[in-house]
Structures are given as C-alpha cells and as structure tokens.
Amino acid sequence: MLLHPMIEPASPLASLHGITKVFANGVTALAGFDLDIRAGEFLSLLGPSGCGKSTVLRLIAGLAEPTTGHVAWPGSTHEDHRSEIGFVFQEPTLMPWADVADNVWLPLQLRGVSRHDARERIAESLSLVGLENFAKAYPRELSGGMKMRVSIARALSLKPRLLLMDEPFAALDEITRFRLNDDLLRLQNDLRCTVVFVTHSVYESAYLSSRIAVMSPRPGRIVAEVMGETPGSRAKDFRTSTRYAALCGEISRILLEHMAEERG
Amino acid sequence: MAPASNPWKLVLPLAVFAAAVGAWEATVRLQGIPPYILPAPSLIGATMIADWPLLRASLLTTLGTTLLGLALAVAGGVFLALLLSLSRIVEYSLYPFAIVLQVTPVIAIAPLLLIYMPQDVAVLTCAWLVAFFPVLSNTMLGLQSVDRNLMELFQLYGAPASRTPLALFRSRLKALWYLRRPAALPAFLTGLRIAGGLSLIGAVVAEMAAGSAGAGSGLAYRIIESQYRLNIPRLFAALVLLALTGIGLYLLLAGLSHRFLRRWHESALAPEK
C-alpha cells in the first residue's frame, strides 16, 4: 500500500530483492521483503519489536546472509561494500579499555591505518559530534548521550556513504534524544550520506525521516511507506509544526490499522 | 586495590594487630608459659634474627619455587587458553583433562611426583599444577567475554575480503589481539591473583610431602623439622615468613591488577564521593 505516488530515481544505492530470512531455530524473520535505498535519503524502518528491522540492517551490512533473495548495489562496482558502511548499534558498544580517540580509530585501525595517519580523521570525526575535547576520556567517564556520540563518530570515521543505525537512541532520555536527533539531521545534511534508521518510535521516525517504511511482524515485511519531510528542509520549529503532527498522526494510524489486522 | 583514601582503613587493622600481639606477649609473660608451648612474639622476633641465615635460605627456596611455579602456570595457562579459544576441536579434546587436574587434590599426587622426579622438580610441578587451572579457566572466560556487538563491528570493518582458511585464521588472530586480549585482561588478572596464593600453597604442600621423606630446605620443611625438634619459636618464625610471603605476593599481584585496570575497569574504580 503506497500512500504517495513515488518517482523512482535512476538507480538506488542498494536494493533488497525478494528477501527471505529464516533463522537456524526455524523462525521466519523476513518474507518477501523488497526495499530500495535511495542515495541521500533518510529512511526509517518503523515497527514493533521482533518485526525483523534489525535483521534488515544486518543483511545490508553483510553481517548476515539472506536465505533467499539478494542485496544488490547497482551504483557500485566493488564486491566488498563494507568500507562504504558505518554501523551504529543500540548500545554504544565502545571498547572500555580504550580512550575515545582509540575507539574512533578502531575501524581505521582494522583497515591498516596507523594511529599517526588516522589522527586527523579521528579529530575530524570527534568534532563532527562535538566531542573534540574528550579524545583522552575513557568511555566510563562519559554520559550515555556522549557515549552514543562517540559511537556515531566511530561510524563516521570511514566516511561511509551509507550509515546504518539500529535504534541508536532508544536507551537515552528524551531530552538527550531530541538533541541527538537534531545533530544527526545536521550531520546528514553536512556529510550528504544516506541513512537507514531503525526505530520503534513513531515520533522519532516522523521527525527524522524523508521516508518511513512501516513494517509488520511474523513474518517481517513492509506494509506501508510514508513520505516524510525532505532532507535539509526542516525549519527550526519542525517539532511543533502541524506538518509534524500530521505525519505522526498518519504513521500512528497506519500502525494501528496493521496491528488490528494482525489480531483480526 | 584503591589508593588508601581513608586512613582508618590502614590504622584500624594495624591497631587490632598491635593489640593482639601485645595481649599475646602479656599473657605469655604473666602466666609464665614455657616457649616450647607458646613462645612470646618477642622471642619469635629474636629467633628470626638468630636463625636468619638458615631461614633466609629456606625463604629464598620457597619463594623461588612459588614464583617459578606461578610464572610457568601463567605461561601454560595463557597459552592453552589461547589455543582453546582459537579452536573448538582443541577445546573439546583438552579442557576435560584440565578439569580433572583441577579437581584432584594435589597433595595426593605429590608423593607420586616425588618418586618420579628429582625433589625440586617435583615441588615445582606441584606449585605449577595448582596455580595452572585458575589462570586457564579465568583467561578462557575473559577471552569469551567480548561484547557480541564489538565482534560484529570487527566483522564489518576487519573481516578479510577473501574466504581462504589462512585469511580467516589471520582474521581470528587479529580479533584475538584487538578485542579478546584486552577484554580478557580483568579476568586474567583475577586468575593471576588466585594463582599466586595457590602457587604458594602448592609449594608448601609439596615441600611437606618431600620433607617428610627426609630431605628439602624450604620454609615448609623448616616447619616440619622444628616440629620434630620441638623448636617452637623457629616454627613460628618460619610461619611468619610464610605469611609475609603470601601477603607480599598478594599485594604485588593486586598492585599489578590495579595498575592495568585503574583507567577503565569497574573493579579498580575509587568509590564516588
């Protein structure tokens, strides 16, 4: 069910075709799953827990293989797409034994970039998330929001074309979450990267996304798409605008409909 | 071991210790207890000084056995833990035997070892045997306790492009070095602290077994010898030295642990004020 007619852009950044994912324990996480990720968009995957949102991200990242179907990268000739991807987990997932700078260094380190050569990149990533003064701090010395910023800086250190985020702000308080939401929008606008954002918050998806894909569980599939605000065009008071309220209302309605269908 | 921010933490146990020693001294003097039943602390001190050349040699023997046993246990335990963590096949085939070694009371093996080996090697083997398992099991636990998400991150950024066995093995080594090694450090240090105490116990137990066979010169042997000769002041002096060795070893290993973990691990944090 498409609520808006959509103009297909020339070629998507990545596209998932006819994906089925069955786990070893026999649970079907995804069935008949199709999704195009368009360059430059902020796509949210919205749905209740257990609908396979995270599995979609893992498939895109190559951390899991689909049972059937495939993930295609039409615009890219590389076989290996991992250098184009930044991944942010729900938990900050920092190395407690390393300071902030070394944590941000990890992806570069694993690609063989020496600490000396990575210096500038680390500083740049940290200043993007406003943590330039915390390079020498250890994760335990930081607040939850700051840890998440480090995690984002780490994902940005490879200058990814595609940023995958798995409910990154779910564990944060609302005030911190609002601020990180704004930071994330600014980052996406500055870096011109594509973001796929998994969330179970209607409000978060409405606030952030240029497109929202609503998912339904058992088996996970996309049941509706809603167009959000175009990237970079949000006014300062978007959170209190009628457009935002209407978006939230529309998304909530769709979710409710499908939950009711499921029960009935 | 947090820096002693609270002076009472040091003053109180010292005061209790001084009071106990004082009461002991007073009781022995006032009641006129003969030294072959209970020597006064002052007499134990005097014996320590008088017999120092003999006790010093014994102390060095026991200390050497303990430290060498501990070092070998660390080398063996860590090596085996790495091997087990890199290969399931090795883990399944060897780990049960490590447990058998652990659950068998070593004092029961000591007489056998004394038959098969030269005495000093047998004592060392005993110290090694008891200290080995805590290092192995704690290091293994540590190596397996890496955050799952971090491993995935590693897979995303660090996994090899090719899927050849050699490339996969190198990637495992890389994960071992960058993630498992630092993640295992706290558990390893816990194992090391336990092993330090056990290594001393192993050395003492083996020396006693060997001593009762009629030879040896470690502190435990001095204790057995003093018991036979009813030289109770020297027995106490040797016991004090053993206790001091244990305390020194503990402080050393706890200090090492604090030195490595103070910046990041919860266990090494000073309490919030």
Image (tube, coloured by chain):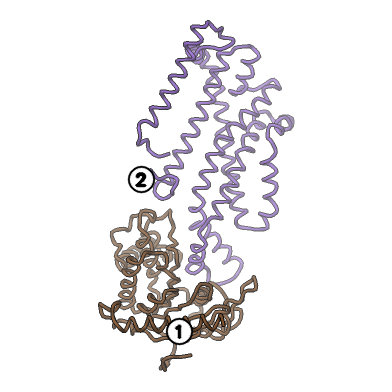
Chain colours: A brown, B purple
Residue sitting nearer the eye, B158 or A257: A257
The answer for which chain carries disc 1 is A
Q: Which residue is mark 2?
A: B272
Residue B200 at x, y percent in the picture: 58, 31
Asked whether the residues under marks 1 and 2 belong to the same chain, the reply is no
In this picture, residue A198 sits left or right of residue B236: left
Please tell me how crowded label 2 is: few (under 14), some (14-19), or many (20+) other residues with Cα within 10 Å: few
Of tags 1 and 2, the one toward the viewer is 1
Residue ID at (58%, 51%): B140
At numbered mark 2, what does the secondary structure look like: helix, strand or loop? loop
Q: Are marks 1 and 2 in contact (CB under 8 Å)?
A: no
Q: Amino acid at mark 2?
A: Glu
Q: Is residue A16 above or below residue B152?
A: below
- Answer with the quarter of the image where residue A167 lies: bottom left
Residue A83 at x, y percent in the picture: 45, 73
Residue A178 at x, y percent in the picture: 33, 70
Residue ID at (38%, 76%): A203
Residue A38 at x, y percent in the picture: 42, 85
Q: Which residue is mark 1?
A: A254
* Residue positioned most to the front: A264
Q: Amino acid at mark 1?
A: Ile
- Answer with the quarter of the image where residue A240 lies: bottom left
Q: Is residue B59 above or below residue B270?
A: above
